[in-house]
Image: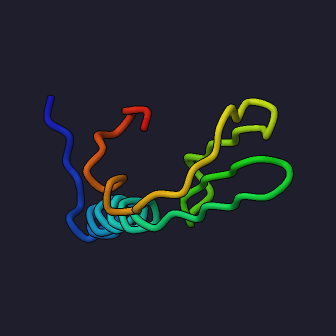
């Protein structure tokens, strides 16, 4: 049994799915990092994913170059 789909009815869905994927990719390519007395909070501009590190979990702090972070692999601890 074949399902017959009206092309006019399917057009909004075929445009919406790539648009949503593009928005998620663009939204997760910009990150907001906040460091304060509470600790470190990192989140994408769309709100997910997000990570929080309480200040009690921070053992040491040092200044460094952001260029070194750009070469790190995803999930690698620096």
**Residue sitting at x 81%, y 32%:** 56
**Which residue is nearer to you in this view: 30 or 77?**
77
Could you tell me how many numbered marks the image carries? 0
- Specify how the rendered protein is coloured: rainbow
**Which residue is nearer to you in this view: 4 or 69?**
69
**Which residue is nearer to you in this view: 24 or 57?**
57
Q: Position of residue 38 (x, y in %)?
A: 85, 49
Farthest right residue? 37
Q: Is residue 27 above or below residue 52?
A: below
Q: Position of residue 12 (x, y in %)?
A: 34, 69
Q: Is residue 19 above or below residue 54?
A: below
Q: Position of residue 1 (x, y in %)?
A: 15, 28
Farthest left residue? 2
The quadrant of the picture occupied by the C terminus is top left
Residue 12 appears left or right of 43: left
Q: Is residue 75 above or below residue 30?
A: above
**Residue sitting at x 20%, y 65%:** 7
**Which residue is nearer to you in this view: 26 or 4?**
26
Q: Position of residue 41 (x, y in %)?
A: 68, 51
**Residue sitting at x 27%, y 68%:** 11
Q: Is residue 52 above or below residue 71?
A: above
């Amino acid at each position: 049994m074949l399902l017959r789909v009206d092309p006019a009815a399917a057009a909004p869905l075929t445009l919406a799915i790539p648009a949503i994927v593009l928005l998620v990719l663009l939204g997760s390519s910009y990150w907001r990092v906040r460091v304060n007395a509470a600790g470190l909070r990192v989140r994408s501009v769309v709100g997910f994913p997000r990570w929080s590190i309480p200040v009690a979990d921070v053992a040491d702090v040092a200044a460094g170059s952001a260029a070194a972070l750009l070469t790190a692999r995803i999930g690698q601890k620096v």
